Amino acid sequence: MKKLQTLALAVAALAVLGGLSVGQGVQRDKRMTPPTGKQPAMGEMKVYEPAPNAPFEFDPGVYNKKVVAQAMASSIVTRKGMEFPIVAKVSSSDPTATGWASCEPGDTQTFAQNAAIDLESGDHVLKTRTYPSEPPLRKIVSPPNADWVIQSYHRVVTSAGHPYEASDSAFPAGYSYLTSGNYSSVRTTMQSFVASLNVSQKIKADLNAKLDTLISNISSYGYSVSASNGTVEHTLTLWGTGRTNTRAAHSWYHGYIDGTLICSPAYLHDQNALVTRLKTWVNGVVRMVGDPPTRTFSYE
């Protein structure tokens, strides 16, 4: 009799345990079933979407990095793989004071028939007589403003008859380009400026990294245009052919200068202008990012 009771209790216990196991298994299956209730086919990726009423999880770090990157990209010009800062133009004729320029690094302009000379002597005049009377005749090629220098040029002679003497000479701009010591000082100044901003540390790091790139590119570009010239002079002296010269009654010369200008803004040779331009660029980026004073956000 006792054996029969013991056996009945064991069967009951097994039944209870089996029921719990089945319940747990059903609950576990519900958790692993996609919310749509559709089972993925063999080899198909399982995608579990949140419930319709679940709160939207927003990652401000990703968004802010994108905003900072876009703000920087919109205020940078890329020329031959190098980035340079651009800023909004302001109403001023002094780029040194404002830090902007009428052109951007890499910009070029061509000019043609500049500093033209067209001169002829009289017929059958003394060989000692010169044209002009106080030679030589001088014509100057000058860039439209101080933001440009003459990258290259050549003299074109369309027609000429001897005796004459023509020449062209180039002269450097009246300033010296920034040195490595100047750029090192600018880096230090800009690091201090960025450190003083009321923005997150991650934004400061992004700004400093981009500033290092910009300053390095500006230094390289400044070196590349330092061999350019500020002006080109075109000169000519004509002489008479002689009173009794039957082969050539007179002498003449017609020529001009063609060439190319390249942008050389003030901040390539004025340290204060460079600092001003970079600070203006940084402030512009921060305004576009919107951090602060209008709003603040976490960059983490």
Image: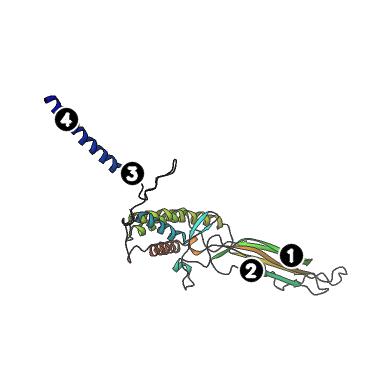
Find residue 251 and report its horizontal and vertical position in percent: 79, 69
Q: Amino acid at mark 2?
A: Ile
Q: Amino acid at mark 4?
A: Ala
Please tell me whether mark 1 or mark 3 is closer to you in this view. 3
Residue at the front extreme, as displayed: 1
Identify the residue at horizontal 75%, vertical 66% (top origin): 158
Mark 4 lies on residue: 8
| Gap in angstroms between the C-alphas marked 2 and 3 | 84 Å
State left or right for residue 146 relative to residue 50. right
Mark 1 lies on residue: 157
Q: Amino acid at mark 3?
A: Met
| Gap in angstroms between the C-alphas marked 4 and 1 | 123 Å
Q: Secondary structure at mark 4?
A: helix
| Gap in angstroms between the C-alphas marked 1 and 2 | 16 Å
Q: Residues within 10 Å of mark 4 (few under 14, many from 20)?
A: few
Q: Secondary structure at mark 2?
A: strand
Identify the residue at horizontal 43%, vertical 63% (top origin): 281
Q: Earlier in the sequence, mark 2 or mark 4?
A: 4
Q: Earlier in the sequence, mark 1 or mark 2?
A: 2
Q: Earlier in the sequence, mark 2 or mark 3?
A: 3
| Gap in angstroms between the C-alphas marked 1 and 3 | 87 Å
Mark 3 lies on residue: 32
Find residue 1 and report its horizontal and vertical position in percent: 11, 25
Mark 2 lies on residue: 140
